[in-house]
Image (cartoon, helix red, strand yellow):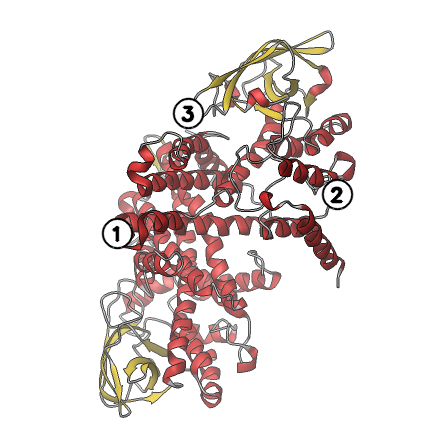
Amino acid sequence: MSELDDFRAETRAWLEANCPQSRRGAFRGFSTFNYWGGRKAEFQDEDQKVWFERMRDKGWTVPEWPVEYGGAGLDKHRAGILQQELRRIQAQPPLQSLGIWMLGPALLHFGTPEQKAEHLPKIARGEIRWAQGYSEPGAGSDLASLSTKGELKDGQWVINGSKIWTTNGDKCDMIFALVRTEPDAPKHQGISFILVDMDQPGVTTKPITLINGDAPFVQTFFDNATAPEGNVVGPRGKGWDVTKYLLGHEREMIGSSMTNSVTETVSSVAKAKLGADGLKADPSLRMAIANHEIESWVLGIAVERLKDMGKAKQFSQFAPSVLKLMGTELNYRRGELLMSISGFDAVNDLFSEPVHSYLHAPANCIAGGSNEVQLNILSKRALGLPEL
Amino acid sequence: MPLVLTEDEVMLVDAARGFLAKSAPVSALRTLRDSGDTLRYTPSVWSEMAENGFIAPHVPEAEGGLGMGYAAAGLIAEQMGHTLAPTPFLSAAIAAELVVQAGSAELKADLLPKIIAGDLVTGFAFEEGLRHNPAGTAVTFKDGKISGTKKIVLDGVGAKLLIVVAATDNGPGLFLVDPSAAGVTVRPLDLIDSRNAAEIDFADAPATPLGDAGAAKAAIARTLDVARALLAAELLGIADEAFDRTVAYLKERVQFGRPIGSFQALQHRAARLYARLDLTRGAVLKALRALDEGDKAATMLCSLSKGAMSKLAYDVMVEATHMHGGIGVTDELDIGLFYKRVRVAGELFGDAHFHTDRIAIQAFGI
């Protein structure tokens, strides 16, 4: 047996012994079923706690990160095997985190040794829950026009302004924010990427209630909030570069999550609710479902191909935009189909599952750079079409 | 196998691209069409393809073939899509597959070398109705004779051998028919893509079985999978080529004092096609790899890739024609040739509607 076979056998045995049964099963989306960590976190139940702690102690919340930063230092092959074995038993993620998906990769790429040592282990161990602070009331997809200000006074940043659409901002401990630090620089420059503690008097949040009754987003206000001078990631005034790097990770995550966050296929829901005869009596709906399943299948294969390309070191620069665009639109149509399938039952209950996802789906088409922004990226950069 | 090309495959693509650019560019199709030649392909180009190992490269080494796999065949088909190369490539791939699947050792030893060498051009007499229909066979085989009419037999004009699907008492069977035999009437069709195809009448034409009826059913099903995957690959090549030409045109065509590619309405439409092409090419390679690996999902993946690529290629051609404006609908511009081939290749062995319905039933049970 090769070393990789040994690793697979050990991993399989360990997961079998350590992953509680209640933490297995189809992925339940980005809900509270999974643990998000942070100073304010509470475990939902004993199994959630046990699963998180065991994985954390193995360094497997971030298996590919170096051991010194709380990871397990696994190479690509072993990380891939771990992924496969987790999928095999349908293990839930032990820790969900913007720190893992977005800030971590950016820090690994742009961070100083001090920043890495300070923040990465806390992300890996779920001690700090991070929020993302990009959009502002006057600057959504057009991030270049953001106006939250940062001034350097006596060795620390003093920050004033507001961020909007901060996901779960009221539950987070720290925020990575884009702040205008060089007011005289051109629009795309003069923005710095700053790490700010949210647990200070200068930072307050206000929930935003959505049409589906949820309030996962808040508006965050900075009123003379402060951050140490050394909390700028990447060069001062070059926050745009850090953000572009990080948004690539976010878009890819949003797009590919549309293929694996699905707990049930639309066709299985349709069969359960309408029965085979009910579907046959509704040929237009049947075809819409079939087309959706086909598109979903094609997207799944595309994600598989992207992973294979990554392993072969063939990186596709525009894949995040493609996945974000196509994945969120597919998810939008999924929501519509589930509404049609559930018919009167669905429109009767704001908190029913189909209504909930139907009313949330448009947000995915906007968050992470609206889909029109993705189309601009593809047409200008991938196709090289001229500026007007 | 991962969904990226191996070094050998990249070399094959380069070789095929180089060969086709020299020997079978789009202008060659135009010349053939305008010459009134009924064969609709150039025998010397076909022979050169054989010399390069481009004909039926998927035939296993044990059967005397190159054993390069279906992915290799698909990559060649994709490159042929780029130049609209008119050749009996698909017919050869189909014949080779049928013989490998259903033929006796003797028949394999006799036919496969000739097919691979490009010496035996065959026609697969399959369709009988207006649309692709694998289930309906009215043509019959009785007492060594075949009767009935087959529509749209690809490369049926000038073929040296016909492989005919006919109903027997034991289900569908595969039969070899000499097109020059008594009772066979070959009527050339004038397909919009200017390729070789015929409608063929059989009136008590003598036929010999290719394998037994039991083997025929599975061999036909398998061959349809292969044909669909190869057509999907060709459609991908066509769509890529037409799209690239269209993007180039968007950059150069000036209206209102600026290149039309600077208008956001057109940019977004182009970007959307780019995204769809980028996604769908994975499904095409996946189907070919599944055939090579004997994956149980291969049948559905071949349907998926053919259906999805047919639909996408139609959409690309509608946009390509529109974005070229008036010149897009003139015969002078090559875009129209791509448009017409996409329509024909899209119909062959099931269009998007056919495959959507098939996948709905067989893969999703609805």
In 3D space, how far apart are the residues under numbered discs 2 and 1 (Cα atoms)? 52 Å
Q: Distance between the residues labelled 3 and 2?
A: 42 Å
Subunit that carries the residue with mark 3: A
Image point 42% across, 78% down: which residue? B98
In percent of width and height, residue B27 lies at 37, 61
Q: Which amino acid does label 2 sit on?
A: Gly
Which is nearer the N-term, disc 3 or disc 2?
2
Image side of residue B261 versus residue A46, left or right: left
Mark 3 sits on what residue? A213
Q: Is residue A386 left or right of residue A343?
A: right
| Marks 3 and 2 close (CB-CB < 8 Å) | no
Q: Which mark is residue A73?
A: 2
Q: Mark 1 lies on which chain?
A: A
Foreground mark, 3 or 2? 3
Where is residue B251 shown, x and y percent of the image?
41, 39
First along the sequence among labels 2 and 1: 2
Identify the residue at image location x=30%, y=44%. Answer: B322
Three-letter residue code for mark 1 = Pro
